[in-house]
């Protein structure tokens, strides 16, 4: 049976962070249409039943935006509908909700657990209150730790997000944050370098030369120090931005990085499902406009809901699989990829593969192609060479 995960996008936050280019609109708690949004997502799910009813459900991920702002009851209704829509589900189904410390008190954490969430990914970003202010976050260092404690009391698996490579941030300071999170009991952490995206407040400030930025070399050093700090505490570097104790890796993200099918639901959600006969895949992106989404989903009108739709050829799927899979420690199984797409991924890239394996940028272990973790700093260039 074909397998698929589900991603549900929740497009609202209490405030827009100055570095964020995700689709999220600032709003107040009172303005969020909790039940109407749940109804809309369930209507979309019904309209997409062809993608779900004969598949096995791998995982569910509520992302955003800030899904912890959603009433637990409304999120739970959506979760129930998703689980019912699939023919079957994997044992011990992983159900993750992204949470912000400013909207994760004890009641919310317990409420999310009560409706079936069993993993929380908490947007800590930093434990330093001055840095959190710089990042435009609504919580402080103590609030982040308290939210993590509530999450750990409520569910068995908790991940935290951290941002490294901030201007003036020393390796020792960041290592102190890694130490604090792992001491608390976190067995999964995502660590991202602060990147400046053009269509953000930080992007505008940087363009005017008004944003303090870390030097590129310092960010590279911070990346290496980050890996060492996690390794010393038993968290392996299993994807370029993700660290976990063995067995605690995000199953949802692994499924995605392995090129698995996923059904995206909600405003701005992206979904991609393959066709076993044509070996192609269909990808869609829903309108990012929450009001337009609510109207289109209510009418079960997938045409009105779509901002973008495209068909990925087997060659496109190979490029995507290389781009995503080479970010991971497990790499890409070329034989499995050829079986999925009907095309040998080596075709058209023999020269690049030979050159990059000779230089040590790539390793081929049987059929498994990898970028060794010590070359991940140059990952983009290595992958670009295979396109
Ligand atoms: S809380 Fe997260 S999704 Fe919302 S604006 Fe900040 S970074 Fe973006």
Image (spheres, helix red, strand yellow):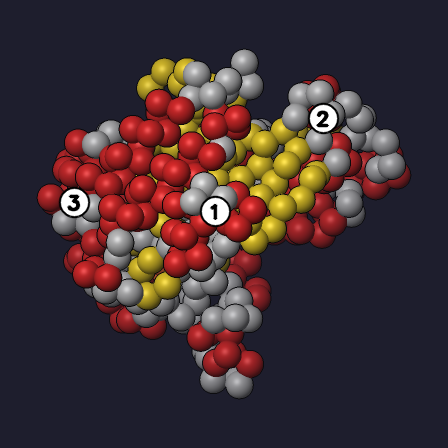
Q: Which one is earlier in the sequence, the residue at label 1 or at label 3?
A: 3
Q: CA distance from mark 2 to mark 1?
A: 23 Å
Q: Residues within 10 Å of mark 2 (few under 14, many from 20)?
A: some
The residue to which callout 3 is attached is 108
The x, y position of residue 18, in whole percent, is 40, 70
Q: CA distance from mark 3 to mark 2?
A: 43 Å
Q: Give the left or right position of residue 84, taking residue 296 as reference.
A: left
Kindly state the secondary structure of the residue where label 1 is placed. Answer: loop
Q: Residues within 10 Å of mark 1 (few under 14, many from 20)?
A: many
The x, y position of residue 28, in whole percent, is 23, 64
Q: Is any atom of residue 279 visible in this view?
A: yes
Q: Residue at x 66, y 33 (%)?
A: 281
Q: CA distance from mark 1 to mark 3?
A: 24 Å
The residue to which callout 2 is attached is 279
Kindly state the secondary structure of the residue where label 2 is placed. Answer: loop
Mark 1 vs mark 3: give the one in front.
1
The residue to which callout 1 is attached is 269
């Amino acid at each position: 049976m074909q397998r698929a995960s589900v991603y549900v996008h929740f497009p609202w936050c209490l405030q827009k962070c100055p570095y964020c280019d995700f689709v999220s609109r600032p709003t107040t708690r009172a303005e969020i249409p909790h039940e109407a949004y749940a109804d809309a997502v369930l209507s979309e799910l019904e309209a997409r039943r062809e993608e779900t009813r004969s598949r096995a459900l791998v995982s569910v991920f509520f992302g955003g935006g800030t899904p912890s702002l959603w009433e637990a009851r409304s999120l739970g209704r959506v979760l129930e509908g998703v689980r019912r829509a699939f023919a079957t589900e994997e044992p011990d189904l992983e159900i993750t909700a992204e949470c912000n410390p400013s909207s994760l008190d004890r009641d919310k954490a317990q409420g999310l657990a009560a409706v079936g969430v069993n993993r929380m990914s908490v947007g800590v970003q930093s434990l330093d209150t001055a840095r959190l202010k710089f990042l435009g976050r609504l919580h402080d260092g103590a609030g982040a730790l308290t939210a993590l404690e509530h999450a750990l009391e409520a569910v068995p698996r908790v991940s935290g997000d951290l941002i490294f490579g901030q201007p003036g941030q020393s390796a020792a300071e960041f290592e102190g944050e890694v130490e604090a999170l792992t001491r608390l009991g976190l067995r999964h952490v995502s660590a991202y370098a602060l990147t400046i995206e053009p269509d953000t407040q930080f992007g505008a400030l940087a363009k005017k030369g008004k944003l303090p930025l870390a030097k590129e070399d310092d960010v590279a050093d911070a990346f290496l120090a980050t890996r060492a700090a996690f390794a010393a505490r038993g968290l392996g570097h299993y994807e370029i931005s993700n660290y976990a104790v063995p067995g605690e890796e995000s199953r949802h993200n692994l499924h995605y990085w392995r090129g698995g099918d996923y059904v995206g639901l909600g405003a701005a959600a992206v979904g991609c499902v393959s066709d076993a006969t044509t070996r192609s895949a269909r990808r869609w992106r829903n309108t990012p406009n929450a009001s337009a989404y609510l109207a289109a989903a209510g009418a079960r009108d997938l045409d009105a809901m779509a901002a973008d739709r495209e068909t990925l050829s087997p060659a496109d799927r190979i490029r995507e699989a290389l781009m995503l899979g080479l970010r991971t420690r497990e790499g890409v199984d070329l034989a499995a990829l050829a079986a999925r797409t009907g095309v040998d991924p080596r075709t058209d890239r023999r020269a690049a593969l030979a050159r990059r394996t000779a230089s040590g940028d790539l390793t081929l272990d049987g059929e498994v192609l990898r970028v060794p973790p010590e070359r991940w700093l140059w990952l983009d260039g290595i992958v670009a060479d295979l396109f």
